[in-house]
Amino acid sequence: MLVKKQIPSDLLTRGIEEIIQRHSLESKLQSGKPLRIKHGVDPTTQDLHLGYAVIYQKLKVWQDLGHKIIFLVGDFTGRFGDPTDQNQTRKLRDKKEIENKAQNYIKQIGKILDIKKTEIRRNSEWYGKMSAEELLKLQSHFTVSRLLERDMFQVRIKKGKEIGYHEPVYPILQAYDSVMLKSDLTIIGTDQKFNELQARNLQKEFGQAPQDVITMSLLIGTDGKRKMSQSLDNYIGIAEAPNEMYGKVMSIPDSLIMHYFELTTQVSATELKAIQNELKSGTNPRKVKARLAEEIITTYHSKKEANKAAKEFDQVFKNKKAPSDVPSYKPSKKKLDLLTLLTESGLVTSKSEARRLIEQKAVKIDNQVQSDWQSPILLKSNSVIQVGKRKFVKIK
């Protein structure tokens, strides 16, 4: 079956850092033959965020053109993890834990990809059956010196830190995934480039045409400095509630508005140019950011939820009112000091965090800033406690 749909003009440019090999990929596109496009992920966190979704949005474009997307769950490799960006050996994970997270990932990618048209695979299909002899034969295609060229290993060697014997095996396993899936193309983050280049060489040795590789730009987190990551707490989860997503999008620096439009939405190239011109002409960035928040929330929830979140955001941040739906909290006593009140209500995780926020004047009761963290407070029913811009509870 041939792919006959019109190819978007920015298919091989938008959000892309590098293509290996461009001429090969262009030739495959011109043939009209549906490509097998692999993307693998180890289920190591509970939720996916917009940083992951940069790749899934690109996969969606290819899927809509009629190509076959193979979503590979690294349920075997995820047990010990990719050493990328790690300065020490990862701990081994439980098989049941990995499977629970895998199910969560599959559910969440369904917000972007058409799951019915997506080939869902697990690499335990082959590694769970592989004998020690077969593994040794696979390893014989590689050299230790080549595998230790990876940047994180070089950093550890210079610092005198240990490298687990299993860690250099990871690129071998990721490479073999492409052999087993007969991948024509893989779309990845820039941090996976080394591993997927190993796949090209291995496919040749197994008599297959080497896959082409597209590396996507990394999404900067809400802090405006580092790549989006749950460990850095600068992420926007794709399963988060609409109000939370809206608030986080509105918090990104103005300088990242176009970065987010390009990488996290399906807004057309023509619209992107128009939005960029709007910003250059002096349009209030807040207005453009509100459009961005609407696009993102519509993708992961609905247009209706996006509109509700926009109204809620204006109520809290523009009109300085409490949210319309504030969770209730019943104090253990009628009088509590502020540190105990904040920790007991779940607004903070520790008294040290509570004290820091009080000193930053980030704690309010009924819209009044609180500065005394030692004196007991007489708590009244329906009083609203606020921490920062987005955390609220109401006293029962």
Image (tube, rainbow, N blue to C red):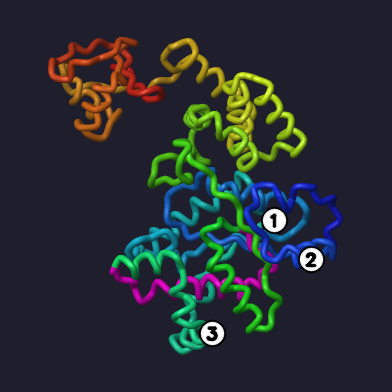
Q: Residue, x 24% and y 25% (percent of image)? A: 342
For the residue carrying disc 2, how many other residues have a C-alpha within 10 Å: few (<14), some (14-19), or many (20+)?
Answer: some
Of residue 66 and residue 84, the one placed in the foreground of this image is 84
Quadrant placement of the C terminus:
top left
Q: Residue, x 33% and y 18% (percent of image)? A: 394
Quadrant placement of the N terminus:
bottom right
Horizontal and vertical percent position of residue 253 = 51, 30
Q: Secondary structure at mark 2?
A: helix
Q: Secondary structure at mark 1?
A: helix
Which residue is identified by label 3?
141
**Which one is earlier in the sequence, the residue at label 2 or at label 1?**
2
Which residue is identified by label 2?
28
Q: Residue, x 65% and y 25% (percent of image)? A: 279
Amino acid type, residue under disc 1 in the picture: Lys
Residue 4 is tagged as none
Residue 117 is tagged as 1
Of residue 341 and residue 230, the one placed in the foreground of this image is 230
- Side of 273 where 74 appears, left or right: left
Structural distance between the alpha carbons of marks 3 and 1: 34 Å
Give the foreground label among 2 and 1: 2
Structural distance between the alpha carbons of marks 2 and 1: 21 Å
Amino acid type, residue under disc 2 in the picture: Lys
Horizontal and vertical percent position of residue 50 = 54, 43
Q: Secondary structure at mark 3?
A: loop
From the viewer's perspective, is residue 186 above or below residue 14? Answer: below
* Residue span colored magenta: 160-187
For the residue carrying disc 1, how many other residues have a C-alpha within 10 Å: few (<14), some (14-19), or many (20+)?
Answer: some
